[in-house]
Amino acid sequence: MNRSLPVCRRSGWFTILLLILGAYTASAQTMAAYGDWQLYVPNNRARVVTDAGDRVYVAAEDAFFYYDKSLNTTRMLTRRDGLSDVGVSTVAYDSVSQQTLIAYKSGNIDVLGADGSIRNVTDVLRKQISGNKTINSIYFSGKSAYLSCDFGLLLFDMTKLEVRESYGNIGPSGSSVRVYATTVANGRLFAATSIGIMHGLLTDNLLDYTRWTINQLGGKGSGDFYKTLATQNNQVYAGVNQSVLFVYKGSSAGWQEVPDTYTNDFRRLRPTRTGLLIASDAGVGLLSNAGRYTLLPKSQTPDPRDVLRAKGGMLFVADYKNGLLLTTDGGQNFESFATNAPANVTAFGLLADRATNTVDIFTGGFKSSYEQSGNKQGFYEYRDGKWTNYTKENFPDLGQFPNPKDMTHGVRTPDGTLYVASYGDGLLEWKGPGEFKVYNPTNSPLRAPEKDVKGDINYTRVTDLTTDADGNVWVVNRHEILGRSGVHVFTPSASTWRSLPYFLGSDNLDRIVLDDYKGVWASAARKGGTGVVAYDEATQITQAYNASNGGLPSNNVYAIVKDRKGAIWAGLESNLNGGVAVFTDPSQAFVPGSTTGFQVPIVRRGETVGFPALRGETVLCIAVDGGNRKWFGTERGLWLFTEDADEALLHFTTDNSPLPSNRIIDVAVNDKTGDVFVLTDAGLASYRGSATITEGKPSCANVFPNPVRTNFTGEVGISGLANNALVKITDITGALVYQTRANGGTITWNLADYKGRKVQSGVYLVLSSDADGNQGCISKIAVVQQ
């Protein structure tokens, strides 16, 4: 190994730097840095747009982003950018104060200044009311903003950034009303509400419900018929659902119908110099100043929710199917800014597969009471940097995609075939569109419950599945038929099934894992909560582990996995005795007379020690990375622990990461790349972790980023090492700079030596070998002056 060093010295590190630059320039442009996050949140379901000068802000159902007019690009905004919450309900720009008001579904408010500053206002969030605090729309008048809310109407001061007045009980006899939109014209305040169009003089005390006039138009009484208002050329227009557009002609003439404007659902009215823009289920329309109503071609705007005209003739449409749309030719051609992402944020399970380098998201699942959700949103697959959404919208032909209901989890066999559990339609064998098979009671031993649904095959409930070393698929069929096993084994090579003998609780299981000794470990369904059951098919011995016997702190088990040393880990419901438990040696489980059980890891390193790991946390999911470290998904964020869970290494929440939510539904690690995919109840994100698995004989390590500047604040990743390799980093003279052991096949380096000092510019050598001192190689890192 050392014979290479004189060559390096004679060549000169500048020559080496040129070689490294050529080798790594392309990859550095495409790979995410270690420790970086990426969001996979769909922005196609756009609802609201607002023009803020250089930017157009868009509130979509699952994302908040802006369009940069000069760059013709979009950028998503999250808490990492300074936002205080998630789930934007509406957004509006105030041209007077040059501030953008961002309202969240929780009632929280952010005020984005022209200088990029963000101020959080919690007046509505802290408001002591029962029910929904959603702000439906925002209308600016002078130095104030009217906030139309589910609980009434608020007057917000755009200078002091505080709520000045609250109109909460303005309905008949002081009752509460939902307010959807407001506008001001000719000294009157108009509000579209759940009881009709209300209006009153601004000079009156509108806190008094008797000062309001209520109009119910088009023969429509109370209900959600009145949701849109706008002032165009000093005249107020109101869209009435399942009716027409109305215009207010003053107190004497009242409201009059606008001909030829009937629609079922008015979504937004926007005043412009050329006329009133209308977004409705009929499409995007324009009521010209001359009174002529025309519709744009609907093929490109199938589901418009909002529309606005910006300077320069640009027309923006927020479409609930195609995202943000832009046209500059009057609507003949639209450019879409929908990102490639999963079709929906609602999901249940994740699968990251190293062999195929794919990630799959499974939608549906079941409710906490184990009732079917009835979800048929398909599954989403990430491959080669692109998402493919297998949904009925994209694959309407059942001969291409059968669209099973309530998908839960999936596995892949060695040939790459995907098997997906469906909590209602059994087991899906998937090789691609048109190449699939569905297993249910008609062609397999799977059964539907007999107690509630009388064996209806549409209730063939598969909760989980796994594979063994031979490529067999083990399936958990929850049917609650006493005396009939719910664990079955499918052999793909022979297309045959076999069922395990019935063992205690096998009719009512949830999650499953196999140990290294062919033992079955499964969690009992939490409906009744009886912990974990282990079964050995060879001896037909059954062991039950619960809070009374076997060391589990809780009977309610959410997750069960096997780590890289064969230990069985369980994620549990919140309790003070620990959120996780581990059975370190499954070989002892079926030894007659054995009293071995689960144990709770104790935190022994870190800021606070001596307490059970994840005490008080509900651990919903567990993943094991290439270094055998444990990723725990909880209701309060994502945790990374050491191999034995005796030290917390990382804790990510919405406060310190782009996670869309703190409730982690599932987590999976791609051992090929080290990426940790995190599924929350508000969408998917990934974190580039520092642990991988190297298969076969390793080549020399890959270094990224490389070259790197001396002021680089991230981490350099070195991957492709022998698993758990000993790694030394030296300078060009051979002096030791840093030493560590790999997490699987990867290490990260923060450009500091073993004393924590930042290194100088130069070429550094990465010397690695396996645990036996073999499979050594030398890689190079170029550190250049900033």
Image: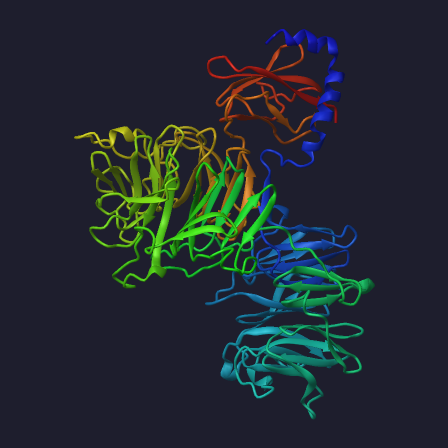
> Can I make out residue 637 in this image?
no
Single out the residue that lies furthest toward the left.
593
Single out the residue that lies furthest toward the right.
312
Single out the residue that lies furthest toward the bottom.
252
Asked if 71 appears above or below 222 in the picture, the reply is above
Single out the residue that lies furthest toward the front.
494
Residue occupying the point 50% across, 66% down: 132
Q: Could you tell whether 180 is left or right of 92 in the image?
A: left
Residue 283 % position (x, y): 67, 72
Quarter of the image with the C terminus is top right
Q: Nearer the viewer, residue 737 or 629?
A: 629
Residue 353 % position (x, y): 49, 38
> Can I make out residue 759 in this image?
yes
Residue 17 % position (x, y): 73, 20
Residue 682 % position (x, y): 52, 53
Q: Nearer the viewer, residue 268 or 433?
A: 433
Residue occupying the point 51% across, 30% down: 691
Q: Could you tell whether 521 is left or right of 286 in the image?
A: left
Q: How many marks?
A: 0
Question: How are the residues colored?
Answer: rainbow
Q: Could you tell whether 772 is left or right of 582 in the image?
A: right
Q: Nearer the viewer, residue 129 or 394?
A: 394
Residue 1, image quadrant = top right
Q: Could you tell whether 366 is left or right of 390 in the image?
A: left
Asked if 628 appears above or below 360 in the picture, the reply is above
